[in-house]
Amino acid sequence: MTDIEDRPGDETIGQRIRRLRKAQRLSQVNLSGPGVTNAHVSRIEAGARQPSFKALRHIARKLGVSIEYLEHGIDVTTREELELSLADLELRIRLEPDTESVERDIEALIPRAQSEGELDIVAKARAALGMVAASSGRLADAIGELEAAVAHPLIRPDLFPDVYATLIACYRQSGRFEEAVVACERTLGQTAHENGPLRILLATHLSHALSDLGEVERARAVLEEHTGDFEQSDPYAQARMHWSLARVAAMQDERRLALRHMRQAIALLRGTEDTIRLAGAHIVCAQILLWGGTAAGVAKHLRAARALLPPHAEAGDRGTLRGLEALLAARQHRFTEARQAAEEALSIMPEHTPEIAPALYAQALAAAGEADYDIADEAFKHVLELATHSKLWQEAALIARDWADMLRWAGRPYESEQATRDAEQYASEAQKRACQRNTA
């Protein structure tokens, strides 16, 4: 009878591990590691225990073979091994809270793929690195990796929509609004008209980027242009469109219309299992109300968002929620709580993103309420610059009025009068925009 070691195709996983270990003159202790003791290895080799994926991955690394070979005894080509390794790493990104070790392994895989001429695998690996960096709030790193990834012809919008959407979001969060607009328009040009859901995704991103630049009418026109795609789209795309329409309406001070669109988005998202987007919709409702100058109903939306948002949510979502909690606390004169929440929000988010506005505003109001006028003055100045840069005249008027009150309390009447005049000018700009919209 032929010995089992001469017939690797008939081996069990345990027998294969034992054969490879002995061939390399390794002990069971040599194969052990975190979560895989030598006793564990012994039981696997004896067939008394089925190895977990984590144990297989660890043992495969120690033996210098692929997981595929350990499981099935089948040799794979270098390309197949690289693809399997990348798929394993992408799975680890989703499952492991600590992404640093995963990033190191992806970075180690890239030169191997480059040396083999597998440039599409390099591009996919860089896309994975970019997505991890984006979720960690490292926007510059994310943009560098994602730009390199989308430069490869394989990384097309129809195959990798999340990569393009994340790159555009990173541009916006970094304050690079013009680049976000260019990327949206270029990507829309590469997307077939039959791909309605993707075109809706890109159109909403383009609308947001244009709104960031203060081009609100153009943002609305983009959404209207893609209503045909909207009517035949899935619930996610429909919710996304309502969301974008709400954003444009809020920027034009049509608060009731904005809330109506967000209620539609919430109703659509409740029929899905996407708690992160549903949490985001409640966050937007809270923003619309707070920037409209009212605290009524805000706490309900923030509580819902807090309950729905998971701990691993992106830094932008967590920071925006904390900033709005800070602003609500400041509006309700809970100044110590507001300052603490604002500091937490600002520590999470990049300093250039427009999403820091609620936290800055809360910081200004809380500092003013505690008579810390120097800090309040700087925070008011910063948040007002954000509002005027985006041509959010109604929000700017609200901020300027509060700043005028602070300056009066600080004994600076001349500056207070100037801030009041600025508030009146911003309110006039908001009224002018409303009149232009009504006569259009």
Image (cartoon, rainbow, N blue to C red):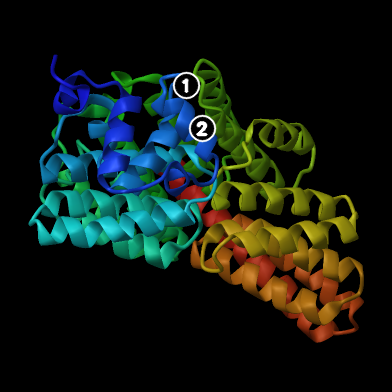
Looking at the image, can residue 13 be seen?
Answer: yes
Circles 2 and 1, Cβ within 8 Å, touching? The answer is: yes
Closer to the camera in the image, 71 or 430: 71
Looking at the image, can residue 215 be seen?
Answer: no
Check the image and report above or below for 271 versus 22: above
Q: Quadrant of residue 296?
A: top right
Q: Position of residue 71 (x, y in %)?
A: 28, 27
Q: Position of residue 269 (x, y in %)?
A: 51, 23
Residue drawn at x 80%, y 82% is 374
Q: Position of residue 418 (x, y in %)?
A: 72, 79
The mark found on residue 334 in the picture is none
In this view, the residue farthest toward the front is 1
Residue type at mark 1: give it: Arg
Check the image and report above or below for 27 versus 421: above
Residue drawn at x 75%, y 48% is 325
Q: Which residue is mark 2?
A: 40
Q: Which residue is mark 1?
A: 49
Looking at the image, tell me whether mark 2 or mark 1 is earlier in sequence order: 2
Residue drawn at x 20%, y 53% is 123
Q: Secondary structure at mark 2?
A: helix
Residue type at mark 2: give it: His
Report crowding for label 1: few under 14, some 14 to 19, many 20 or more residues within 10 A (C-alpha): few
